[in-house]
Structure formats: C-alpha cells, structure tokens
Amino acid sequence: MLKEMLNMLVSVFVKNEDSNIGKLFTIAAEQLADASETLKTIEEWISIDNAVGKGLDDIGDDLNQYRGKATDEIYRVMIKGKIARSLSDGTINSMIDALSKTLNCSPSEIQLVSSIELGEGEPNAIIVNKAPLNALNKIGLSASQFVQFVEQVLPGDASISRVNLEGTFSFASGNDVETSELGFADLNGTTGGTFGGVFTPADDYKLPI
C-alpha cells in the first residue's frame, strides 16, 4: 500500500520511503491497513456462518430469533430456519427445500410424504420418512429439536404423524457380503450404509422457535 501511495505523488516529490513525505505516508499506510483489517473482520462476522457469540446474537435479534440455551452451531440453524421458513409455501418440495437450507444438507437427504400417500388415511398428516442424520449429529440437534424445525415449515392445518430415524444399513440376504451403498463401509468410510439414531444430550431442551 505504501508504494502505491508514493507512486501516486507527482514527480516534484521524492518517492522514497525514507523521505519526510515517505515517513508521513508510512504512518498513514499503517493506519489504513489496520482499518482495512477491521472492516474485513466485520464483514466476516456479519455472516451467519462465521459470526460467534454476541455477533451472532445481534444477527438473531435483527430477525427476532432469540438464542435461548442454544449453542452457536444450533443458533445458526435457528436463524437460517427463520429465513428459510418465510420462503416456504407449504408444498412438500418447498418444505424440503426450507429444511435442507436450514440444516445445510442436500434435499435428497430429507423425504416428507403425506400420510394418505402411504395409505394410512390420516388427513393433513405428514410423515418424515427420511431424516438427514449426519447433518443433525454434526450440528448437535436432538430428534425432538429436529421435529420442531419440521413443525415450523408445515402448513397451519398440518401435523407430524411420525418421524423415521432409521439408517440405511442392511445385511445381505444371502451368504455374500453386501457390497452396495447399504452394506458395510469400506476402509475409508466413504461407502456403506448408515445406522439410525440421533444423539440426544442429557439436557435436551425445547428451542425458542
């Protein structure tokens, strides 16, 4: 920055860092660099994904989404959920889209179906047939907290009939080892089925959403 400032001087000035004007510009360049770094930090902290502590609280307050007892990780999800819910029109696809954006996962990891679609005949009931277990465990959301997020994207007259938290793992039907994406994982853990279940902390609590 200092060299750029000196190069902007007209030719009658000595463009040297050791000159009087060079020393003056050195002080100014240091101050500008500090200000630039501060602005960069502020820009990063106003991002939901980067903000922590009080900075994250301020973002939530602007959206009337309060933290309660939530950790930063869960609070980020609550804030994103507040934004995503406003974009949902109550259709199955829009609900899945809102939940995937909230939990930062692929829409393919979530499957919502109507009770009637599965032949159970319960009107206005939604079944969570597939839940993003990896995303929930990574964030630290319990099963009951996940249900809260699903309830928030449902139309006003709908309810949750049940939530399936089963994994995709299955044993082979014969004597051969299961080699599909549903079987045992490889040495790198990049393939194979997943076990069901979501981590539930001992102090599980209801989120203020």
Image (spheres, helix red, strand yellow):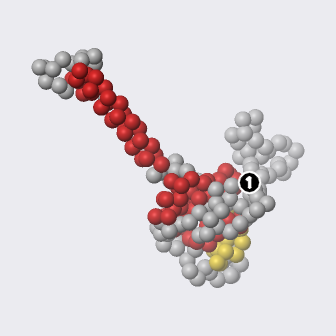
User: Which residue occupies 48% across, 66% down?
Assistant: 63
Quadrant where the C terminus is found in the figure:
bottom right
Residue 5 lies in what quarter of the image?
top left
Location of residue 161 with respect to 77 vertically, above or below = below
Between 196 and 60, the one lying in front of the other is 60
Between 175 and 44, the one lying in front of the other is 44
Location of residue 143 with respect to 122 vertically, above or below = above
Instruction: Report x, y in % for residue 89.
Output: 48, 72
Give the residue at mark 1.
Answer: 168
Q: Is residue 49 visible?
A: no
Residue 149 as seen in the image, left or right of residue 58? right
Residue 58 as seen in the image, left or right of residue 115? left
Number of numbered discs on residues? 1
Quadrant where the N terminus is found in the figure:
top left
| Farthest front residue in view | 20
Between 204 and 41, the one lying in front of the other is 41
User: Which residue occupies 67% across, 50% down?
Assistant: 138
Between 128 and 49, the one lying in front of the other is 49
User: Which residue occupies 31% across, 26% down?
Assistant: 26
Q: Is residue 122 visible?
A: yes
Instruction: Report x, y in % for residue 61.
Output: 50, 64
| Farthest right residue in view | 175
User: Which residue occupies 64% across, 78% down?
Assistant: 159
Q: Amino acid at mark 1?
A: Thr
Instruction: Report x, y in % for residue 169.
Output: 77, 51
Q: Residues within 10 Å of mark 1 (few under 14, many from 20)?
A: some
Instruction: Report x, y in % for residue 128.
Output: 67, 67
| Farthest left residue in view | 12
Label 1 element class: loop
Location of residue 71 with respect to 160 vertically, above or below = above
